[in-house]
């Protein structure tokens, strides 16, 4: 993600949304690998606007994103990187709605996750819709095809799974890049063990 950001000057400013424990790691990686200054957003009080520039990279965590939306939107981001994308699998959660609001109108969105599918295909729809809304525009046709919908006394349930091979091909064709651990093992740092 950072390499692509560094090699494309047109995608500035950019915003990284990640879990709180990863904010400073992202800042270190940006400074070390692409020599790019960044700001880490903290707390719930944001400036009134993003006017007057600022660093090319802003880093915010999911829990406070809704407080920072006006500031981040006023910066007119060209790229949003969503780290640990499985955090936005529930379309009703505030963080999912905040991420969707942040990404609205942004030309480039990257969702990075090692676990895009936690339990069932219905959880993957929010991510797929965010990245490629033309290919995955509405939940119901997606759910009818891949989630084995069933009508219960309390309403429709989408907790099944079917045609997963077709879903995988469709994702790879439209918006997913899949890397296996063996493919990137040479790029990973050595394991550190602490007792």
Image (cartoon, helix red, strand yellow):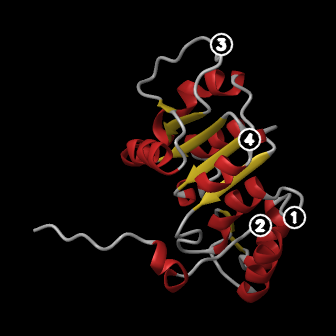
Which label sits in the foreground, 3 or 2?
A: 3
Q: What residue is shown at x 76% (from left), y 76% (from top)?
A: 172
Which label sits in the foreground, 1 or 2?
A: 2
The residue nearer to you, when weighing 31 against 122, is 31
Are dots 3 and 2 in contact, CB under 8 Å? no
Residue under label 3 = 52
Q: Is residue 67 above or below residue 29?
A: above
- As measured in the structure, the alpha-carbon distance from the residue carrying label 1 to the one carrying label 3 is 37 Å
- First reached walking from the N terminus: tag 1 or tag 3: 3
Residue under label 4 = 9
- First reached walking from the N terminus: tag 3 or tag 2: 3
Q: Secondary structure at mark 3?
A: loop
Q: Give the left or right position of residue 16, taking residue 136 as reference.
A: left
Q: Secondary structure at mark 4?
A: helix
Q: What residue is shown at x 82% (from left), y 69% (from top)?
A: 174
Are dots 2 and 4 in contact, CB under 8 Å? no
Q: Which mark is residue 175?
A: 2
Are dots 3 and 4 in contact, CB under 8 Å? no
- First reached walking from the N terminus: tag 1 or tag 2: 1
- As measured in the structure, the alpha-carbon distance from the residue carrying label 3 to the one carrying label 2 is 34 Å
- As measured in the structure, the alpha-carbon distance from the residue carrying label 1 to the one carrying label 4 is 27 Å
- First reached walking from the N terminus: tag 3 or tag 4: 4
Which label sits in the foreground, 3 or 4?
A: 4
- As measured in the structure, the alpha-carbon distance from the residue carrying label 2 to the one carrying label 4 is 22 Å
Residue under label 1 = 135
């Amino acid at each position: 993600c950072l390499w692509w950001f560094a090699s494309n000057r047109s995608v500035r400013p950019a915003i990284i949304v990640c879990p709180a424990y990863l904010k400073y790691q992202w800042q270190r990686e940006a400074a070390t690998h692409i020599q790019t200054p960044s700001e880490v957003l903290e707390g719930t009080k944001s400036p009134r606007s993003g006017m007057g520039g600022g660093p090319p990279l802003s880093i915010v965590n999911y829990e406070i994103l809704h407080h920072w939306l006006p500031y981040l939107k006023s910066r007119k981001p060209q790229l949003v990187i969503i780290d640990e994308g499985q955090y936005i699998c529930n379309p009703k959660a505030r963080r999912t709605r905040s991420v969707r609001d942040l990404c609205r109108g942004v030309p480039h969105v990257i969702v990075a996750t090692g676990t895009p599918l936690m339990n069932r295909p219905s959880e993957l729809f929010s991510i797929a819709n965010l990245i490629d809304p033309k290919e995955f525009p509405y939940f119901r046709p997606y759910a009818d095809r891949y989630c084995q919908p069933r009508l219960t006394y309390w309403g429709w349930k989408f907790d099944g799974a079917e045609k997963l091979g077709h879903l995988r091909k469709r994702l790879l064709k439209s918006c997913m890049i899949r890397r296996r651990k063996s493919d990137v093992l040479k790029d990973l740092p050595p394991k550190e063990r602490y007792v």
